[in-house]
Image: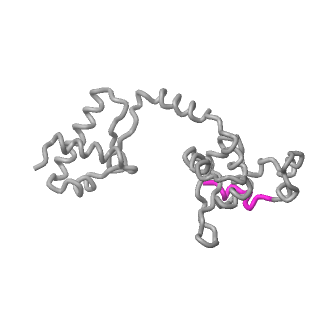
Amino acid sequence: MIEPKEAKSIIESLLFISEKPLLIEQIKEILPELDAPYIRSLVDELRLQYQDDKRGLSIIEVAGGFRMTTSPDVANYIKKFYKSRQRERLTVPSLETLSIIAYKQPVSRLEIESIRGVNVDGVINTLLEKGLVRIAGRKEAVGRPFVYGTTRQFMEYFGLVSLEELPKLEEFSHIPGLTQQETNATPVKKSNEAIT
């Protein structure tokens, strides 16, 4: 028989990694030697420990299961953290790549690299992590590469209501090095359908 301390440790780990509320039945699948009421009592003990120790995390019951969340007591500090993260400036390579995606979406990595002339793997990963771009599907081409599009967070970041508010490419014709073909190009999609 598994010791209560070890069982609580396992349950705590499961709560931490679970993306959705963790059901008692799911815990029972992992710990079949424990019955449901006992698992429930262990979860309740964990909840009280988090509450009594005034930890930065708490365990709440939601949608028939349990979820680990941040404590309401630290909400203001979390807001400050996210505000400081949102203020992070984008690098020039990130802005260039993001511009290409915004105007040409859905666009593949290879198409972006052919415009920029450099590898964009790292930049695209950074933009994905920041939630400014998303994988919008696959291109009907050899190898079926991913294509990228912008997100709602992109719209929020730049204060746009829709992609229609993006400056027209013709407005950039005065920029040295920009070809006539690039300034005459129109985005593949300019509706909010490109955004999720």
Q: Nearer the viewer, residue 60 or 31?
A: 31
Q: Nearer the viewer, residue 146 or 78?
A: 146
Q: Where residue 100 sits: x, y (%)? A: 72, 53
User: Seen in the image, is 3 located left or right of residue 108?
Assistant: left
Q: Residue at x 74, y 54 (%)?
A: 103
Q: Which residues are magenta?
A: 186-196
What sort of colour scheme is used for the picture? Answer: one colour
Q: Nearer the viewer, residue 172 or 3?
A: 172
Asked if residue 84 is positioned above or below residue 121 in the image, the reply reads: above
Q: Main secondary structure of the magenta part?
A: loop
Q: Where residue 33 sits: x, y (%)? A: 14, 54
Figure quadrant of the C terminus = bottom right
Q: Residue at x 59, y 53 (%)?
A: 121
Residue 194 in magenta stretch: yes
Q: Where residue 6 sits: x, y (%)? A: 18, 43
Q: Quadrant of residue 54?
A: top left
Outermost residue, left side: 1
Asked if residue 113 is positioned above or below residue 68 in the image, the reply reads: below
User: Seen in the image, is 193 located left or right of residue 85?
Assistant: right
Q: How many marks?
A: 0
Q: Where residue 101 sits: x, y (%)? A: 69, 54
Q: Nearer the viewer, residue 67 or 90?
A: 90
Q: Quadrant of residue 50?
A: top left
Asked if residue 94 is positioned above or below residue 106 in the image, the reply reads: above
